Image (cartoon, helix red, strand yellow):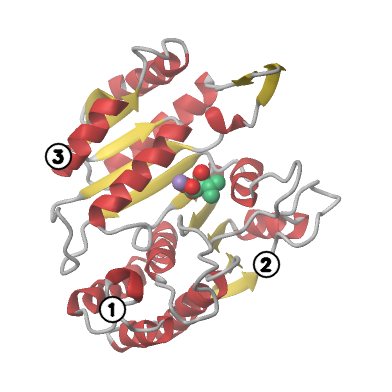
Amino acid sequence: GGSITATLFPGDGIGPEIAASVKQIFKAAGVPIEWEEHYVGTTLDPKTGSFVTYDSMESVRKYGIGLKGPMATPIGKGHKSLNLTLRKELGLYANVRPCLSIPGYKTRYDNVDLVTIRENTEGEYSGLEHQVVKGVVESLKIITRQASMRVAEYAFHYAKTNGRKRVSAIHKANIMKKTDGLFLQCCREVAEQNPEIVYEEVIIDNCCMMLVKNPALFDVLVMPNLYGDIISDLCAGLIGGLGLTPSGNIGDNGLALMEAVHGTAPDIAGKNKANPTALLLSAVMMLRHLNMNEQAEKIQSAVLKTIEEGKYLTGDLGGNAGTTEYTNAVCEKL
Ligand code: IPM
Ligand code: MN
């Protein structure tokens, strides 16, 4: 058949190198995707009032699918995070972060297989902070029924369509009675409509303890924005770090922007040292989202085999291969 166009944000720092790795592997695997590349963050677009250009957001809206490398937000007064701007402006309300042990890459755990689903538009990320009087500042945590319902619905939908059995709502409603209370109530309502999925509620501090003691206790976890930010890093740590974990931002009508969660790593940028795995696995998520399951499987298993074999690992995984050697090794396994 014909090919699909997808938006690509190579991003900053190591972004262009790991994006090149994805492009090379997609080509080698014969994936019928054309990339429309966009670079953002250098000029303020008067149309958006942001460093994220109007054209780049239109591109994601038009094609409905995109892949994003790490972005450095220009420092200065009122410069909002490019990452957050994309999520908010594109209405990407659910952030899906699968975390799966990588066979052959040894950590303290060999049985991690869970998915964090993070509310992606509100909570403490609403950007509403101000000084009340000198020495007293205030931050507004916004929780709405609408955003909580749609992320809860997404979590149960995800569980059902991915063969998962359990959804755990993570919260601190014993203290945050109103905000987390509303979030939990929405999760309960959705749980009642999905009796085939086991539903439980776990207080976040206890959840952290359980995760490091025995991550196999968890399956799908759904939670408000800031908790999801923190828990997903904790989970990434269980399997070897942010260089290995993919992430997907999901909106209405199938709109999706997959991204590597790690930073731009300016210290190793341009040195052929970056590990492209997180972006590669995000690209695999993108393929599954497009129902290109065969290619997704092929690339994922080539990536996992390369890591398991251990001959061409990048520095973060204890090896001394460059990004390009690792990428070539993946291509040979396709
Ligand atoms: C993430 C990142 C972002 C966040 C930053 C870069 C704004 O940590 O995707 O988890 O806090 O959401
Ligand atoms: Mn984070």
Q: Nearer the viewer, residue 11 or 213?
A: 213
Per the model, the C-alpha gap separating discs 1 and 2 is 32 Å
- Give the image location of residue 333, x and y in percent: 27, 85
Q: Nearer the viewer, residue 270 or 17?
A: 270
**124 w.r.t. 89: above or below:** above
Disc 2 within 8 angstroms of ligand 1 (CB): no
Q: Say whether disc 3 or disc 2 marks the residue closer to the N-terminus.
A: 2
The amino acid marked with disc number 3 is Lys
Residue drawn at the location 24% of the way across and 56% of the way down: 239
Give the structural element (helix, strand or loop) at label 2. Answer: loop
Nearer the observer: mark 1 or 2; the answer is 1
Nearer the observer: mark 3 or 2; the answer is 3
Q: How many marks?
A: 3
Give the structural element (helix, strand or loop) at label 1. Answer: loop
Badge 3: how crowded within 10 Å, few (<14), some, or many (20+)? few
Q: Where is mark 1, residue-wise?
A: 319
- Give the image location of residue 188, x and y in percent: 33, 19
Q: Are marks 3 and 1 in contact (CB under 8 Å)?
A: no
**308 w.r.t. 145: above or below:** below
Q: Where is mark 2, residue-wise?
A: 38
Q: Nearer the viewer, residue 74 or 147?
A: 74
Q: Nearer the viewer, residue 44 or 259?
A: 44
Residue drawn at the location 36% of the way across and 23% of the way down: 187
**155 w.r.t. 11: above or below:** above
Residue drawn at the location 47% of the way across and 16% of the way down: 179
Q: Say whether disc 1 or disc 2 marks the residue closer to the N-terminus.
A: 2
Q: Where is mark 3, residue-wise?
A: 213
